[in-house]
Image (cartoon, rainbow, N blue to C red):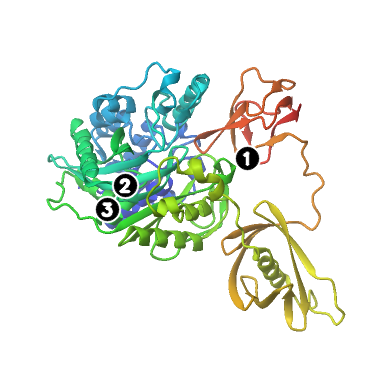
Amino acid sequence: MITSVLVVNRGEIACRVFRTCRELGIRTVAVHSDADAHALHTRVADASVRLPGEAPADTYLRGDLIVKAAVAAGADAVHPGYGFLSENAGFARAVLDAGLVWIGPPPEAIEAMASKTRAKQLMGIEPLTEVTAADLPVLVKAAAGGGGRGMRVVRHLADLDAELAAARAEAASAFGDGEVFVEPYVENGRHVEVQVLADTHGTVRPLGTRDCSLQRRHQKVIEEAPAPGLPAELEAELHTLAVRAARAVDYVGAGTVEFLVAGGRAHFLEMNTRLQVEHPVTEAVFGVDLVAEQIRIAEGHALDPDPPRARGHAVETRLYAEDPARDWAPQTGRLHRLALPEGIRLDTGYTDGDDIGVHYDPMIAKAVAHAPTRAEAVRKLASALERAAIHGPVTNRDLLVRSLRHPEFTAARMDTGFYDRHLPDLTEPSPDPHAPLAAALADAHARSRPGFGGWRNVPSQPQTKRYLMAGEEHEARYRHTRQGLEADGVRVVHAEAGLVILEMDGVRRRFEVSRHGDQVYVNTTALTALPRFPDPTAQHAPGSLLAPMPGTVVRVADGLTAGAPVKAGEPLLWLEAMKMQHKITAPVSGTLTSLPVAPGQQVEPGMLLAVVQEA
């Protein structure tokens, strides 16, 4: 009987595993890097152990330190979560050798399937070894790990070597394994997967399908169960192939077999020998707790002889601290508030006041809705996200809402090329035009005091306040009168620091206003209060390239120095932030007049990286 579990992970998945452990009466142990010393997963665990350092290679990828932590904390079992060491057979063996229970598949099964190259060979599929122009497009893929790291689509043969090098570096940083391989790239297929559970008594059970087609940079954004619109014969084939893959390696525990579906055919991708990020949609549809099932299987129990039945439909969105309109640039900063309406499952590793840093994946939370039908679940989740209070760094919330309401998604006609086709429309700014006025009125009330800002007998100039909203400046104008506050064309019904009610054309609207320093949130619209007089020093030379995010300069283009000619679109340097590499390219053809950064240098948002003078 397991009594204490250490989770080899951080953030959302650690908190999620701890929740089930508490329900089962099992003590919990967290591990944390220095960057995560005050993270939520360390605060909700019964005990925590420090892993000195901040980078994953020094902390969450150090299996030796984690085994020592489990022994020191008195844990008798280890749960791998997902990512990091979750698919590392050597680590699984080290856990078992230490006399601990491994809540995962046998090391031999991990070894067979954790390398995507070996997994494909096991299923009778060989990777490409010699790539020619006829093979294009191809996909460069990390042999270990997942989450889109170490993946590159190559459409031009001349780009292959550079993309191989970038994928190796990214995979090594994220998973401690730089092995990559090349396979044909299936354009605009659907990403469909099957959840499997297998016990030590010979039972392998498929638990329906999931559709994970909406992806950015090969990382899933929206997932749902069951996968909509699959013919019964194809769904049966997917189940059969998934069970075959599990039995081929004597699998035990929870795992996922992934496929690309195109032209009515299923193409095997890989088997993930761990829990998936999107497991909550399967839990919602089948009414099971997959973490509890993992623990029971690890204790030697057999699966229930009566398989659970699917009920309804579930949809999950991943809320990221990122800006989809700026090439998905990850964002950092203080998360002031995170709140969704009741009835939505929220799995997160953050609470109000926590900081989102640069070291790890930018996912803030997963929001899950379950309903009797797909249409109801989609509507429920879109409405909840639209109403959610998310105050802090820029997120992909608006993108998620628009994606859920897009005709292709509502009609279940989506594929993996969805964002390639629709990203510009999905990221078009649509701020509330009345938000600046509501913010200004709330600010006026918050700052008012006797003898300050009141009405006058003599008409005066209107009060003004400037805000930055959706990248543009907006000015709000209002007056104090005997009747209260007035604004052109709008009747002010009520104004206080946290709530403003405006009436337009006989319709009253409520605006909830929150302020955190210069950041103001009016309902779901974010604004930045601007100073009355602009800072004359905040200027940069034409052609300046500024860091779009905090991160580390990991590479500068070979031979690149100040004075060199460059072409528009030519890569100049690469930044690594939140486990992904981001390419900085020349905006125009001309001369590189300044390159003030070097590999290994830490940069902050807005820091000057290079200057390109247009020819």
Find residue 192 and name its label: none
Secondary structure, mark 3, is: loop
Kindly indicate the quadrant of the structure image that contains residue 77.
top left
Find residue 210 and name its label: 2
The residue tagged 1 is 548
Percent of width and height locating residue 593: 75, 26
Q: Is residue 237 above or below residue 18?
A: above
Secondary structure, mark 2, is: strand
Q: Residue at x 30, y 42 (%)?
A: 193
Task: Give the mark nearer the N terminus: 3 vs 2.
Answer: 2
Q: Nearer the viewer, mark 3 or mark 2?
A: 2
Percent of width and height locating residue 602: 62, 34
The answer to whether residue 595 is left or right of residue 51 is: right
Q: CA distance from mark 3 to mark 2?
A: 16 Å
Find residue 289 and name its label: 3
The answer to whether residue 48 is left or right of residue 109 is: right
- The amino acid on which the numbered mark 2 sits, given as a three-letter code, is Arg
Percent of width and height locating residue 258: 31, 38
Labels 3 and 2 touching (C-beta < 8 A): no
Q: Is residue 251 visible?
A: no
Task: Give the mark nearer the N terminus: 1 vs 2.
Answer: 2
Q: Nearer the viewer, mark 3 or mark 1?
A: 1
Secondary structure, mark 1, is: loop
